[in-house]
Amino acid sequence: QKEVEQNSGPLSVPEGAIASLNCTYSDRGSQSFFWYRQYSGKSPELIMSIYSNGDQEDGRFTAQLNKASQYVSLLIRDSQPSDSATYLCATLHKAGTALIFGKGTTLSVSS
Amino acid sequence: NAGVTQTPKFQVLKTGQSMTLQCAQDMNHNSMYWYRQDPGMGLRLIYYSASEGTTDKGEVPNGYNVSRLNKREFSLRLESAAPSQTSVYFCASKTSGTPYEQYFGPGTRLTVT
């Protein structure tokens, strides 16, 4: 089982809707979680970090962490066509040495 | 402040040829990484360097070697390229303590024929 699992999608939402992206992880010891956005042909860009249970909000983005369920999610409110991209979930590998990534979920926002 | 830079941006190799991918960061980060990204496979860690003078294997190290030349530079070498190494290669660097923020370079698109 890969350490970080994501549904590859595509996830399609209309403009203005809430997009919900989900991620599960296998290592109960993982403490730090990250969401990256990657536009086609570009490099991944960090958009959210979350380290404790609950919600972390930044503008239209909310990251949610539930360590008991080993589940991380990203909510994008008021989705825009410019949010269309692949979203990568990552956790800090044991020993805190490297990020391990899921395969990513492709989001498509239609106008 | 350029962040993480990579050269070259594109490269085509024939099977058996060798080449070195260069990476440099100007953020004074201790840790640096090489990933490859293939369709349907996500980002996979090849090698990393937690600090100057140390390197360690990641998930897919076979066929690659690395050198941490100094704190700024971390190179990836393909000694004898194979078609299976056709991929997009990303270099990244990361802060040592919290927040653990990892930043990526623009990538190198490598094709091995």
Image: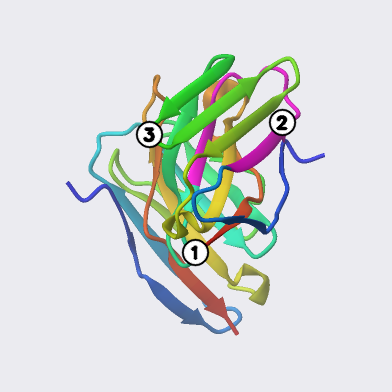
How many C-alpha atoms fall within 10 Å of the one at disc 1: few (<14), some, or many (≥20)?
Answer: few
The residue where tag 2 is placed is: A25
Are the residues under marks 2 and 3 on the same chain?
Answer: yes
Secondary structure beneath dot 2 equals strand
> Any mark on residue A111, and which?
1
- The image shows residue B38 at horizontal and vertical percentages of 63, 63
Are the residues under marks 1 and 2 on the same chain?
Answer: yes
Prevalent SS, magenta region: strand
Q: Amino acid at mark 2?
A: Tyr
The first of marks 1 and 3 along the sequence is 3
The magenta region covers: A19-36
Question: CB atoms at circles 1 and 3 under 8 Å apart?
Answer: no
Do we see residue B79 in this rendering? no
State whether residue B47 is above or below residue A15: above
Viewer-side residue, B34 vs A91: A91
The first of marks 1 and 2 along the sequence is 2
Q: CA distance from mark 2 to mark 3?
A: 25 Å
Q: Amino acid at mark 1?
A: Ser
Exactly how many numbered labels are in the figure?
A: 3
The residue sitting at 46% across, 67% down in the picture is A41
- The image shows residue A101 at horizontal and vertical percentages of 61, 42
Do we see residue A70 in this rendering? yes
Q: Quadrant of residue B99?
A: top left
The residue where tag 3 is placed is: A59
Residue B66 is a magenta residue: no
Residue A23 is a magenta residue: yes
- The image shows residue B13 at horizontal and vertical percentages of 51, 81
